[in-house]
Image (spheres, rainbow, N blue to C red):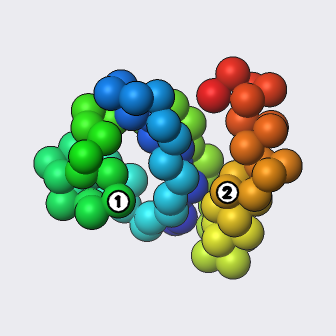
Amino acid sequence: MFHVYILRSEKDEKRYVGFTTNLERRLSEHQTGCVTSTKNYRPLQLIHSEEFFNKLETEQREKFFKSGKGRTQLKEMGL
C-alpha cells in the first residue's frame, strides 16, 4: 500500500507533500527531525493522506499536489 500525505508546519503554515509505503514510520521521521527538508519546520501536523495500490498512481498524485493546479486545489479544499 502506498500513501500520499500532506503535512502543515505549525511554525509557519508551510505545506509539505510526500509519499511513502509506511505512513506511521514516515510521520515519525518527520516529527523527530530525520527529514532534512522538514526538520526546521517542526512541529508538523498531518492534514491529508490518500492510499493507493499502485506506485505510479501515487507518484502522479504527489506530482499533481506539487503543481500549480494541485496547490490551487489544496487551497480550495481548505488545506
Q: Split into 4 quadrants, where in the image is the C terminus?
A: top right
Q: Choose top left, top right, bottom left or bottom right for residue 66.
A: bottom right
Q: Which residue is mark 2?
A: 66
- Judged from this view, the residue extending furthest toward the left is 32
Residue 37: assigned label: 1
In the image, residue 63 above or below residue 48? below
The answer to whether residue 47 is left or right of residue 72 is left
Q: Is residue 21 above or below residue 13?
A: below
Mark 2 or mark 1: whose residue is earlier in sequence:
1
Residue 59: image quadrant is: bottom right
Figure quadrant of residue 76: top right
Residue 37 spot, x, y in % from top left: 35, 59
Residue 54: tell me if it is visible.
no
Q: Residue 60 placed where, x, y %?
A: 73, 69
Is disc 1 placed on a helix, strand or loop?
A: loop
Q: Position of residue 46 (x, y in %)?
A: 43, 35
Q: Amino acid at mark 2?
A: Lys
The circle drawn on residue 63 is none
- Which residue extends farthest right? 69
Is residue 16 among the parts visible in the rendering? Answer: yes
Disc 2 crowd, CA 10 A, few/some/many (<14, 14-19, 20+): some
What residue appears at the point 51 percent right and 62 percent down from the top-left corner? 19
Location of residue 8 in the rendering, given as x and y in whole percent from the top left corner: 45, 34
The residue sitting at 26% across, 38% down in the picture is 42
Contact (CB < 8 A) between labels 2 and 1? no
Q: Answer with left or right where residue 67 lies relative to residue 8.
A: right
Q: Of the residues shown, which amino acid type is indicated by label 1?
A: Ser
Residue nearest the viewer, comparing 50 with 41: 41
In-image side of 79 versus 6 (left or right):
right
Question: Marks 2/1: CA distance?
Answer: 15 Å
